[in-house]
Image (cartoon, rainbow, N blue to C red):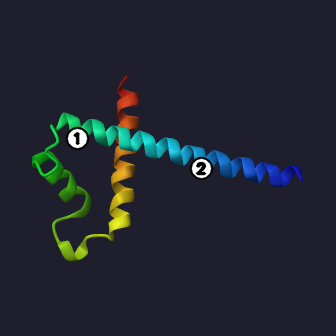
Amino acid sequence: MDRGRQIGVATYDALVRTIVHTVDALWQLLRLAIVTRGRLRGRYWHWRRETAFGTDPSRMPPRMERVRAVLRYGHWVGRMRRLAR
């Protein structure tokens, strides 16, 4: 019984960590959108898109993979901002 409870706690911890990371990533992406004055098709975001996914539309990853990559980028931005403090 105790072993089953540990697995449940680990699953719960992973779920909470995922939620926290997602919220942090969304917050950082919102902050970046504000800093770039909402110009999501501007030079900075165009450069980010090309750097992350390339310029060839036929080699573009599927939509959900791109969404996950953008969230990972947002989370990374948050970690780097915290390290700079």
Relative to the observer, which residue lies in front, 15 or 56? Answer: 15
- Spot occupied by residue 15 in the image (x, y as percentages of width and height): 59, 49
Give the CA distance from mark 1 to mark 2: 27 Å
**Which numbered dot is residue 33?**
1
Say which amino acid is labelled 2. Leu
Q: Is residue 73 left or right of residue 4?
A: left
Q: Residue furthest top?
A: 85
Q: Check disc 2: other Cα within 10 Å, few if <14, some if 14-19, many if 20+.
A: few
- Tell me which corner region of the image, top left, top right, bottom left or bottom right, holds residue 67: bottom left
Q: Check disc 1: other Cα within 10 Å, few if <14, some if 14-19, many if 20+.
A: some
Q: Residue furthest bottom?
A: 58
Relative to the observer, which residue lies in front, 66 or 37? Answer: 37
Say which amino acid is labelled 1. Ala
- Spot occupied by residue 50 in the image (x, y as percentages of width and height): 18, 59
Tell me the quarter of the image containing the C terminus: top left
Name the element at disc 2: helix
- Tell me which corner region of the image, top left, top right, bottom left or bottom right, holds residue 82: top left
Name the element at disc 1: helix
Residue located beneath label 2 in the image: 15
